[in-house]
Image (cartoon, grey):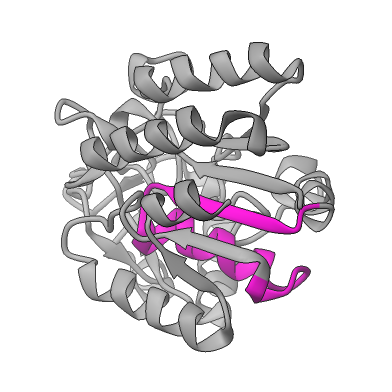
Amino acid sequence: MKNSLLIIDPQNDFCSPEGSLFVKGAEEDCRSIKKVLENLDKKIDSIIITMDMHHFYDISHPGFWINAEGEKPVPYTIITKEDLVQGIWKPANPENYNRALDYLIKLELNKNFSCCIWPPHCLIGSPGAGINQEILDSACKWEVDNGKPVNFVYKGSNIFTEHYSAIRAEVPDPEDRQTVTNMGVIKILKNSDRIIVCGEALSHCVKYTVNDIIEYIPEEKLYILDDCSSPVTGFEEQGKAFLREMEERGANIVSSDFVIENF
């Protein structure tokens, strides 16, 4: 049986209490993920670690937007197409108006969510974008023990679209290959018999990554670790609903101890 371990966004801005978008529970999640890495080791055939990588100037960060009074939106503000059309919020750079309008229209057509303004996080080159040290150390040890590299997947550097899912951006940019479906990741996962899923955050990047994966891969291959992933504060119900839906569809919702004992 080939086992893949998919660790989604185990980065300091999510996993450290000092991080700009700390996910409550992520510290414990990281310790449990480390335990999985250390105990399974040679039973893991491939590891994929995804990483959010944003510019400070990003459509989901405050610096992109401005209102009539010249103020920036506070984090967790929701900006809709109507807000832009009515002038409640507009791009600070007027040249980006049409791109922003196109994005908001397509985002709302997808019916997943509206544009949420997040605290600037996982900025390219910043300590916050780095991987949790315990997980990184264990991943490096796995590389040496198994004589193969971890597959790192970077997402989020296109300033005109959010990129929760590691498979594709919410609104893909046809001129940016990093935003369209990542068939390389799908290929690795298709060649696996069991896919262990963990990381941050359950309510967002884990959820949307899994939703995209199951377009290509049977749900029963997935083993989602419920003690290795936590929701963004205020989005707890979304995380619970996601786990219920996945279980109903045939995915395996299990603990880290379960995979350590049974794989």
Residue sitting at the far front: 261
204 or 63, nearer to the observer: 204
Q: Is residue 207 magenta?
A: yes
User: Residue 23 appears in which quarter of the rendering?
Assistant: top left
Give the x, y percent position of residue 206.
47, 57
Residue at the location (31% across, 59% down)? 89
- On screen, residue 163 above or below 214: above
Q: Is residue 111 magenta?
A: no
Q: Is residue 224 left or right of residue 140?
A: left
Q: Is residue 48 left or right of residue 248?
A: right
Residue at the location (34% across, 47% down)? 65
User: Residue 105 appears in which quarter of the rendering?
Assistant: bottom right
User: Residue 11 appears in which quarter of the rendering?
Assistant: top left
Q: Is residue 46 visible?
A: yes
Give the x, y percent position of residue 202.
37, 59
Give the x, y percent position of residue 169.
62, 54
Residue at the location (40% across, 38% down)? 33
- On screen, residue 248 above or below 60: below
Q: Is residue 176 visible?
A: no
Q: Is residue 117 left or right of residue 217?
A: left
Residue stretch in magenta:
192-220
Residue sitting at the far bottom: 248
Residue at the location (78% across, 54% down)? 186
Count numbered badges in the picture: 0
Give the x, y percent position of residue 263.
58, 51
235 or 90, nearer to the observer: 235
